[in-house]
Amino acid sequence: DLVNGSGALNISANSGSKFNIDLSTLGFNADNFNDLTGYAWKIADFGSVTNFAADAFNIDKSNFSNTFTGTFAVALGDSPGIGGDSSQIYLTYTAIPEPGAALLGGIGLLFLLRRRRSEN
């Protein structure tokens, strides 16, 4: 869902008294969700946002049916990699890279270092 407003959104939630976001799929799974891909969904768009703190939000994922290993968070639109502005709030998903890709990269680096040592 997207909440739109033309005025200011003043967030009164804080890390001790959080605003709850219930993340749910409509049906068995969220179509086109890929656990290995990062996402940013705009959930609020106002004239301005004040008193925003990412730790003032609790994301309840118990009704999200898809398998996921990454992390969900809340961010302002002007955060790096989001592409919005400071008057927008986004629900984000950060994927965790596959261990296979990281492992292959590490093995390749070790091979290059070993080759460089043997040439010296």
Image: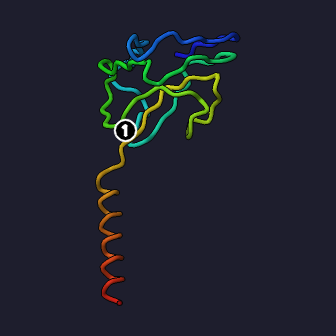
Residue under the point 30% across and 87% down: 118
Residue 81, compared with residue 56, is above or below; it is: below
In the image, 67 versus 89, the foreground residue is 89
- What colour scheme was applied to this rendering of the protein? rainbow
x and y percentages locating residue 2 in the rendered image: 56, 16
Q: Residue at x 57, y 34 (%)?
A: 79
Mark 1 — residue? Answer: 35
Which residue extends farthest bottom?
120
Give percent across and percent down for residue 17.
40, 10
**Label 1, residues with CA under 10 Å away: few <14, some 14-19, many ≥20:** some
Q: Is residue 58 above or below residue 94?
A: above
Depth check, front residue: 4 or 54: 54
Q: Point out the image quarter for the C terminus.
A: bottom left
Q: In which quarter of the image is residue 76?
A: top right
Instruction: Identify whether 114 is placed above or below 95.
Output: below
Residue at image x 50%, y 22%? Answer: 53
Q: Is mark 1 on a helix, strand or loop?
A: loop
Across and down, in percent, residue 67 comes to 30, 32
Percent coordinates x, y for residue 65 in the rendering: 31, 24
User: Image height check: is 33 above or below 48?
Assistant: below
Count the numbered circles shown. Answer: 1
Q: Could you tell whether 75 is left or right of 71 in the image?
A: right
Q: Is residue 19 left or right of residue 41?
A: left
Identify the amino acid type marked 1: Asp
